[in-house]
Amino acid sequence: MSVQPPYASYNRMNRRAIYSLFLLVFLNACSSDKDKPAKTNDPTYTLIFIDKTRSVNVNKDFVARKYQQAITDIVEQTIHQKGDKLEVYFIHENTSKARALNVTIRSEMDDISAASPTDREAAETEFNLTLTREKAQIRQRVFQQLMAQNVGSSNQETDIWASLPVIAKANESGATVRVYYLSDMIESVKGNGRRDFQVKPPKDNTQADEWAKTDAESLKRYIIGSPDITMVLPFEPNASVKENNPAVTQYWQTLFAELGAGAVEEE
């Protein structure tokens, strides 16, 4: 009768112990993942500011197409779940009081944590269909606001500063705030301590930065948080520098950054 060396028995026992330990860790990991609640995303609070002053003509084909596409993209990128919110404000003489649209998403996914694969797929399909219909309705309502004409006296001034308390109010909600300006960003308000870029725009980026930093000191009373801000300008690619003054854009880039905004983009 052959006798196995003692180290062979030891190796078998060692392998069994390692395998048992691995199996225990794997089962615990599976159990831990199963017990974790499904991760939910924070709601998104989207603000769209549409310029309703005489300097922006949405009846021009280029502007209408660009802004309609921008609205389509905004709705698609920011609306995903129940509780997402979208508001439209008009930019003019009384921007902060000019809310034109306020919607909150109602589409809700059923609880599928204990559902079978078939039921899970059915629930997801139903949710996606409902959300798609709701987004289409919202998109059309924003289109209507885009094309609405402002023939009143409020179209004489462009008060973009007045959008800041609106953003600050959205920041108080605790949601992820995203801001879109469909505007030429030509601030034009008469009076002491205000900017009128139609009369006196910044002459270069250096002056734009200086003005923005000076203005930010008085505007920091509005706690806007760190929203992502996108400026969708109505200018065609071949627009002159006089029409599309890059120093004006630089002013807003610097001002929003000074106030704590996250990404600030121009389209």
Image (cartoon, rainbow, N blue to C red):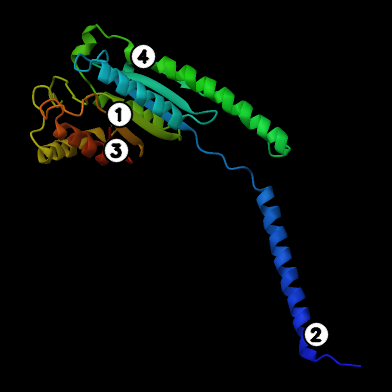
Amino acid at pointer 4? Gln
Of marks 3 and 2, which one's residue comes earlier in the chain? 2
Towards the viewer: 197 or 25: 25
Q: Which residue is mark 4?
A: 145
Q: What residue is shown with label 3?
A: 264
**SS for callout 1:** helix
Residue 121 position, x and y percent, is 66, 34
> Residue 202 vs residue 233: left or right?
left
Rounded to the nearest whole Å, what is the CA distance between mark 3 and mark 2?
A: 68 Å
Circle 4 Cα neighbour tier, 10 Å, few/some/many (<14 / 14–19 / ≥20): some
**Label 1 Cα crowd, 10 Å radius (few <14 / some 14-19 / many 20+):** many
Callout 4: helix, strand or loop? Answer: helix
Tell me the amino acid under the disc marked 1: Leu
Circle 2 SS class: helix
Quickly name the residue at label 1: 164
Mark 2 → mark 1, Cα distance in angstroms: 76 Å
Q: Residues within 10 Å of mark 2 (few under 14, many from 20)?
A: few
Residue at the right extreme?
Answer: 1
Task: Kindly identify the amino acid type of the residue bearing the numbered disc 3.
Answer: Val
Residue under the point 38% across and 28% down: 169
Q: Could you tell me how far apart the alpha carbons at marks 2 and 4 are, in whole angstroms?
A: 81 Å
Q: Residue at x 51, y 31 (%)?
A: 80
Q: Which residue is mark 2?
A: 9
The mark nearer the N terminus, 3 or 4, is 4
Residue in the image at 78% along x and 86% along y: 8
Q: Earlier in the sequence, mark 1 or mark 3?
A: 1
On-image quarter of the C terminus: top left
Residue type at tag 2 = Ser
Pinpoint residue 257: horizontal percent, then vertical percent: 26, 40
Disc with the residue nearer the chain's start (2 vs 1): 2
